Amino acid sequence: NVEKSLPQNAHYQKWIWPVYKLGPVIGLVMSLIPLFVLKYPDSLKARVEADLAERRKARALADDGEDGEPPLRMAEREARLGHQQKKEQ
């Protein structure tokens, strides 16, 4: 099927490999620009970390089992609920 494909001109053949290799590098450099330009002071960093810690704590408390166990994976939780229902019957 390679013979049936359209021929590529010499200009395309000359530039496709550098573009293929340099495209991601250019994207990486452009994504690094905001890291160097935007200011992220320590006070904002501390506030964000405190907010995240509070959210994580609230989520952990909401996910705890009735007896204060750590959060379980969904499959484990469903298996435990099924096992408890069988005991009750």
Image (cartoon, rainbow, N blue to C red):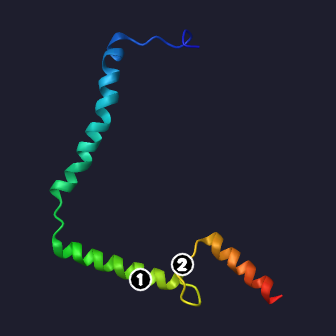
Estimate the spatial distance between the alpha carbons at disc 2 and disc 1, rounded to whole Å: 12 Å
Pick the quarter of the image with the C terminus. Answer: bottom right
In the picture, the quarter occupied by the N terminus is: top right
| Label 2 Cα neighbours within 10 Å, binned few <14 / some 14-19 / many ≥20 | some
Could you tell me the amino acid type at mark 2?
Pro
On screen, residue 67 above or below 14: below
Relative depth, front residue between 3 and 46: 46
Tell me the element at label 1: helix
Q: Are marks 2 and 1 in contact (CB under 8 Å)?
A: no
Q: Is 56 or 36 nearer to us in this picture?
A: 56
Name the residue located 58 percent from the left edge and 85 percent from the top edge: 65
Q: Residue at x 29, y 41 (%)?
A: 27
The count of marks equals 2
Mark 2 element type = loop
The residue singled out by tag 2 in the image is 71
Mark 2 or 1: the one toward you: 2
Q: Looking at the picture, how far across and down is residue 49, in whole percent?
A: 29, 75
Q: Position of residue 8 (x, y in %)?
A: 42, 13
Q: Which residue: 36% across, 82% down?
A: 54
Q: Which residue is mark 1?
A: 57
What percent of the width, then of the height, locates residue 46? 23, 76
Q: Residue at x 59, y 89 (%)?
A: 66
Q: Residues within 10 Å of mark 1 (few under 14, many from 20)?
A: few
Q: Is residue 9 left or right of residue 4?
A: left
| As drawn, 14 above or below 44 | above
